[in-house]
Image (cartoon, rainbow, N blue to C red):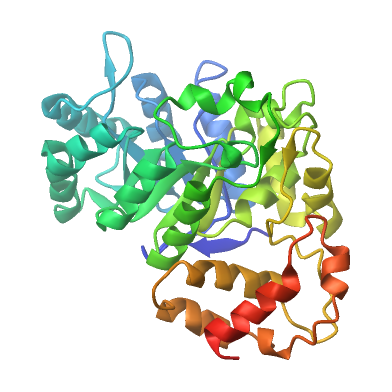
Amino acid sequence: MMKYRKLGNTGLKVSEISIGCEGFSEDNYANTKVLLDAAEQSGVNYFDLYASDPKVRTAVGSALQGRRDKFIIQAHICSIWKEGQYKRSRQIEEVKAGFEELLSQLQTNKIDVGMIHYVDSMEDWEAVCKGPVMEYVLELKKAGKIRHIGLSSHNPQVALKAVESGKIEVLMFSVNPCYDLQPAGEDVEELWNGKNYEKPLVNMDADRQNLYETCQRKGVGITVMKAFGGGDLLDASLSPAGKALTVVQCLHYALTRPGIATVLVGAHSKEQLLESLSYETASAADRDYALAFAAFPKISWRGHCMYCSHCAPCPQKIDVASVTKFLNLARVQEEVPETVREHYEVLEHHAGECVQCGACEKRCPFEVSIMENMKQAKELFGK
């Protein structure tokens, strides 16, 4: 049974597993209907369409006939088709023409999430934010041609700037346990450059952690791309971590980060899509990524809470992972955000009930100072 999550503050509820468009062009574009059929039958109601290839878009439009209301579409503005190939454009006339072509090819009068395409440099964000692209996107929303404004990026500093601007409601971002250790940069190819993994990496990049937590606080929903690192994380010979993970482990990692609404899985066949959808019925043991992470030869998460719940069960019945997540969301702020405080309040048991027995720390694969976290949470939240 598919689970659904709120897409930030948009009011939309999206399947936690959704699909990217990588496989739509295969089998002479017939794979589009195959994948959307399988998605609908499995309860998947969200997909991303970054591709500007008119044949892909036309195939999607045909496959949506009679069931447009079954899917929430995330499609990209500024992704255009020019001289027979894909191009990212900021030329406003090209952008406008490309979007109108998109609507026509999809045979629809609106897009649910209009995603400003591929903003990875601060200079580009400033140009988009203060220039005609943002003006046009705001016009589209006012006219009802897009329901919500999104932005796609691989750079956590740029993405954070966009989130804090208040102009976007949805963020498409690359999330996986290897990329999450890499520092911010404007060259996306550096995320999978093997040279950047030659030295041991320790703990999550602070900018990425801050981005996810800020999105959760502000109600900006994150749609995840590259959860499998282009498939590299599933192959020990290719994985930057030096060991392979399973599809289910990669999905669980992404879905347990703050702010995440859905993971867009790349599928080149119905079988690949169903493999990802097996996450919904996977056991806790199959989903568990903690022990695999702790055994990575090239990466260390020592001291960093992964919200994996290996610390459970607590003899005082405290949900340690949730308490820690709310602590992390709150302590970087001058004042505790009211929404975080409210979520903490409704927990059945609170950090103040911790008796400092240390049982949780003995079970933690990452040697987190859990008892100290409980003390800090009690001080911060007052209970």
Residue 161 seen in the figure: yes
- Residue 268, image quadrant: top right
Q: Position of residue 221 (x, y in %)?
A: 43, 57
Q: Position of residue 365 (x, y in %)?
A: 82, 56
Q: In the drawing, does residue 309 fall left or right of residue 190?
A: right
Q: In the drawing, does residue 363 fall left or right of residue 341?
A: right
Determine whether 101 is above or below 152 in the image.
above
- Residue at (73% x, 66% y) in the render: 369
Determine whether 263 is above or below 166 in the image.
above
- Residue at (34% x, 24% y) in the render: 52
Q: Nearer the viewer, residue 374 or 256?
A: 374
Location of the N terminus by quadrant is bottom right
- Residue 374, image quadrant: bottom right
- Residue at (56% x, 62% y) in the render: 4
Q: In the drawing, does residue 60 fall left or right of residue 110?
A: right
Location of the C terminus by quadrant is bottom right
Q: Nearer the viewer, residue 146 or 159?
A: 159
Determine whether 92 is above or below 216 in the image.
above
Q: Position of residue 284 (x, y in %)?
A: 82, 59
